Image (spheres, rainbow, N blue to C red):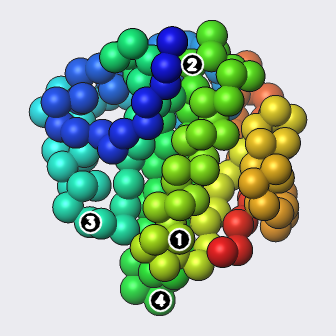
Amino acid sequence: MDITIERAQPEDAGALIAFLNRIGAETDNLTFGSEGLPITLEEEAEIIREKNRSPRNSLLLAKKGGDIVGDASIETLPRRMAHRAEFGIAVVKAEWGQGIGSRLLEAAIEHAKAQRIEIVELEVRSDNERAIRLYRTHGFVKIGTYRKYFKMEDGTYADFDLMGLYL
């Protein structure tokens, strides 16, 4: 089945919330877990509208048969940091290894280039080898490591690597 990559629209809010709840339950690599995000349908629709108001920001969705199977965001920083943007990405576990992450990342990089963003930055769990390999393949370099970035439910910590792509 074909995967389409498209910019999120307010009418995607309900499906996006369901997607976020699903991926939160599938991995410990995100800032939230199976509890999902405390957000209403109206709040999510407004977040999408706000992102779409700025041509420099983008929330991209990967859809398979109309269902959201991945997302990627580019969020520019303010004022003297406006040449930089934060990047985030997630794909449902059933679709890992199918190239969806690469397609989303490539679309996000093209968006950043078109908007003359100079640096795309991200944080990734230091032990998430699959994601780190994806980012390196697309030109990201490790800037450093943030020790104890996450505190897990069991009281242990996870380190995160800070990575940047210099366009």
Q: Is residue 13 above or below residue 103?
A: above
Q: Residue 1 has which mark?
A: none
Q: Is residue 112 visible?
A: yes
Q: Is residue 24 visible?
A: no
Q: Which residue is at a point 70% across and 74% down the rendered structure image? A: 166
| Sequence-earlier tag: 3 or 1 | 3
- Distance of mark 4 from mark 3, alpha carbons? 17 Å
Q: Which residue is mark 3?
A: 54
Query: Camera-side residue: 93 or 137?
Result: 137
Residue extending farthest left: 42
| Sequence-earlier tag: 4 or 2 | 4
Mark 3: which amino acid? Answer: Ser
Mark nearest the camera among 4 and 3 is 3
In the structure shown, which secondary structural element does the residue marked by tag 4 occupy? Answer: helix
The crowd level at tag 4 (other Cα within 10 Å; few <14, some 14-19, many 20+) is: few
Relative to 57, 23 lies left or right: right
Mark 1: which amino acid? Answer: Lys
Mark nearest the camera among 3 and 1 is 1
Q: Which residue is mark 4?
A: 80
Q: Is residue 66 above or below residue 131?
A: above
| Quadrant of res 152 | top right
| Sequence-earlier tag: 2 or 1 | 2
- Distance of mark 4 from mark 2, alpha carbons? 35 Å
- Distance of mark 2 from mark 1, alpha carbons? 27 Å
| Sequence-earlier tag: 4 or 3 | 3
Query: Camera-side residue: 17 or 38?
Result: 17
Q: Is residue 150 above or below residue 3?
A: below
| Sequence-earlier tag: 1 or 4 | 4
Q: Which residue is mark 1?
A: 113
